[in-house]
Image (spheres, rainbow, N blue to C red):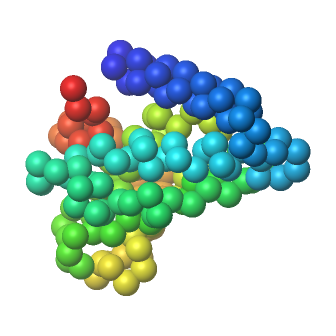
Amino acid sequence: MQNFISLLTWKKMFLEMVVWLQSCGAFNYCGTNQWIPVIMPIAPYIIRTIRDPEKPNTLEELEVVTESCVEVHEINEEEYLVIIRFTPTVPHCSLATLIGLCLRIKLQRCLPFKHKLEIYISEGTHSTEEDINKQINDKERVAAAMENPNLREIVEQCVTEPD
C-alpha cells in the first residue's frame, strides 16, 4: 500500500511540476527532448533516499549516487531512456549488485513516465564491473532475485522511504 501511495505522490508532484514549468515558459514543448528538463530532476530525487545495505547512510550520503550520475535520453515522444551510473565506495564492494538491484527496483516503482532503464557501475570503479553490469540489466536475473524472500526483504528495507 505504501508503494502505491508513493507512486501517487510522485505522479502528483510530476504533474504539478509540469504545470508550473509550462506556466513559467521554462521550456519549449515543440520539437524533440521537450520533457527532459522536467524529467531530469526526478530520477536523482527518487534514488537519493535509498539506504546502503550495510551502513546506516543513504547512497547519496556515501556519494554512491549523485545528481550527475543520471542521464535521460528521449527514445520517442512517449518514452525515455534513463541511465544511472553509480560508484561503489570501494573497488571490491561485495554489495554492488544489491545496490544496483535497489536502484532498479526503486526507479521502476517510482518513475512517473514510460521509460527504459539502464544501470551501470561507473567505469573503472569496481573490480568486476562488467559482470555486475550484466546482472543488474538482465530482466530475468532481476526477476529471479526478487523472488528470493530474503533478498526481497533486504531490497524493501533499502528502498522504503524514511518516515
Which residue is found at the position 71% from the left and 43% from the top?
A: 26
Dividing the image into 4 quarters, which one contains the N terminus? top left
Viewer-side residue, 89 vs 148 = 89
Is 73 on the left or on the right of 46, as rendered?
right
x%, y% of residue 27?
A: 75, 45
Viewer-side residue, 145 vs 154 = 154
Count of numbered circles in the view = 0
Viewer-side residue, 44 vs 134 = 44
Is 35 on the left or on the right of 15, as rendered?
right
x%, y% of residue 128?
A: 32, 78
Above or below residue 115? Residue 83 is below
Q: Please, which residue is most extreme toward the front here?
A: 24
Q: Please, which residue is most extreme toward the right here?
A: 30
- Dividing the picture into quarters, in which one does residue 159 lie? top left
Above or below residue 22? Residue 128 is below
- Dividing the picture into quarters, in which one does residue 158 lie? top left
Which residue is found at the position 55% from the left and 21% from the top?
A: 12
Above or below residue 160? Residue 129 is below
Dividing the image into 4 quarters, which one contains the C terminus? top left
Is 113 on the left or on the right of 123, as rendered?
right
x%, y% of residue 72?
A: 62, 56
Q: Is residue 135 visible?
A: no
Is 2 on the left or on the right of 8, as rendered?
left
Above or below residue 89? Residue 40 is above
Which residue is found at the position 73% from the left and 29% from the top?
A: 23
Q: Is residue 124 visible?
A: yes
